[in-house]
Amino acid sequence: MKYLCQSTEETRELAKHLVSELRSKDHAQVVALTGDLGGGKTTFSQFVGEALGVHDAIQSPTFLIEKIYELHRAPWKHLVHIDAYRLDEDYELLNLGWENIVSKPENIILVEWADKVKNILPPDTIHIQCTFIDENSRQFEISENNEKA
């Protein structure tokens, strides 16, 4: 599905809607965000965190690669925010404990620049292609199971 958000408030509402649709599984829920600089990946991630009850300022962890936020909203205990921008190969994320993080059903994982690690994403990953339209507008194309919407 494609969504045109013409304000940050519309983006916030879309992120809130996405969170309301998420269901627990036998492994982590992964949301893969792709798109060019300025496409809205970090803003969308911030609003997902907000919808999950994160009170800390969520910033893209470009130099840290990964930041973990504690959640108090069942069934999830952690929001794991990953920025793969600086990674060159999938194995670099594997070296950071990816298999352990993705195996835990209490984790929600947001991966910015997910195209850099696409080969290790679970088959049921939710994919969001973020596109810059203009200063106020972004398009979000949401699909599941590695299929285009």
Image (cartoon, rainbow, N blue to C red):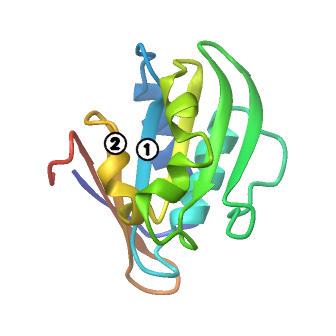
Q: Is residue 55 above or below residue 66?
A: above
**Residue at image location 60% in from the left, 53% down from the top:** 82
Q: Position of residue 5 (x, y in %)?
A: 42, 64
- Is residue 58 shown to the viewer in this render? yes
Q: Position of residue 53 (x, y in %)?
A: 73, 32
State the residue in front, 108 or 3: 108
Q: Is residue 104 above or below residue 144?
A: above
Quick one: which residue is furthest to the bottom in this view? 134
Other-residue count near label 2 (Cα within 10 Å), few / some / many at <14 / 14–19 / ≥20: many
Q: Earlier in the sequence, mark 2 or mark 1?
A: 1
Indicate left or right for 5 with 111 as reference: left
Q: Secondary structure at mark 1?
A: strand
Q: Looking at the image, do the residues carrying marks 2 and 1 touch, with CB atoms under 8 Å apart? A: yes
Other-residue count near label 1 (Cα within 10 Å), few / some / many at <14 / 14–19 / ≥20: many
Quick one: which residue is furthest to the right in this view? 56
Which quadrant of the view contains residue 8? bottom right
Q: Which mark is residue 31?
A: 1
Q: Which mark is residue 126?
A: 2
**What kind of residue is marked 2?**
Ile
Q: Position of residue 41 (x, y in %)?
A: 51, 64
Q: Position of residue 80 (x, y in %)?
A: 64, 41
Indicate left or right for 48 with 61 as reference: left
Q: Is residue 100 above or below residue 105?
A: below
Q: Is residue 136 above or below residue 129?
A: below
- Is residue 10 shown to the viewer in this render? no
**Residue at image location 28% in from the left, 33% down from the top:** 124
**Residue at image location 60% in from the left, 63% down from the top:** 43
State the residue in front, 11 or 142: 142
